[in-house]
Amino acid sequence: MPIILIFPDIHDQRRSRDKKERRYSPLLSYLQSEGYYYIDTLRALEPYEEMYSIKALTVKWGHYSPTGHRIISKYINAHLNEWGFTDLPELKETIQKEQERLGLSSQ
């Protein structure tokens, strides 16, 4: 069962700060319409836009800084907890339901 992680680049972060639409909005719409589990990590950074500059959240070549990684990892973990993916019995049940939804046999 895939969990799709979307990591914005520096351009996406600039667009967010300028209150512009995400370049990958069509992808998000598709993932949502198909019922995929996905995490748009730009949502993790948005509450911190006033507190941190893009430069503070990234390092050379657009990779994330330790601060950026910390913010994003907490956001990802919160989603995994919300979906019950950190509780093994609940995770097994979720996988079974997803396999049934997709018409796959459990193995």
Image (cartoon, rainbow, N blue to C red):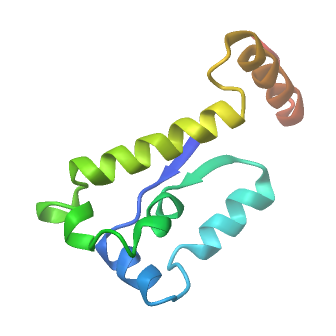
Residue at left offset 70%, top offset 64%? 30
Whole-percent x and y of residue 103?
A: 87, 30
Residue at left offset 72%, top offset 34%? 83
Whole-percent x and y of residue 92?
A: 75, 14
Note whether residue 84 is visible.
Answer: yes
Q: Pick whichever, 24 or 56, lies toward us.
A: 56
Side of 13 relative to 44 (left or right)? left
Whole-percent x and y of residue 45?
A: 44, 63
Residue at left offset 78%, top offset 54%? 34
Q: Pick whichever, 84 or 27, lies toward us.
A: 84
Side of 51 relative to 42 (left or right)? left
Which quarter of the rendering shows the N terminus?
top right
Q: Pick whichever, 46 or 3, lies toward us.
A: 46
Q: Pick whichever, 40 or 2, lies toward us.
A: 40
Seen in the picture, residue 93 relative to 46 is either above or below; the reply is: above
Q: Quadrant of residue 87?
A: top right
Residue at left offset 79%, top offset 14%? 106
Residue found farthest to the front:
51
Number of on-image labels: 0
Seen in the picture, residue 64 relative to 87 is either above or below; the reply is: below
Side of 26 relative to 22 (left or right)? right
Q: Quadrant of residue 58?
A: bottom left
Note whether residue 2 is visible.
Answer: no
Whole-percent x and y of residue 39?
A: 57, 51
Which quarter of the rendering shows the C terminus?
top right
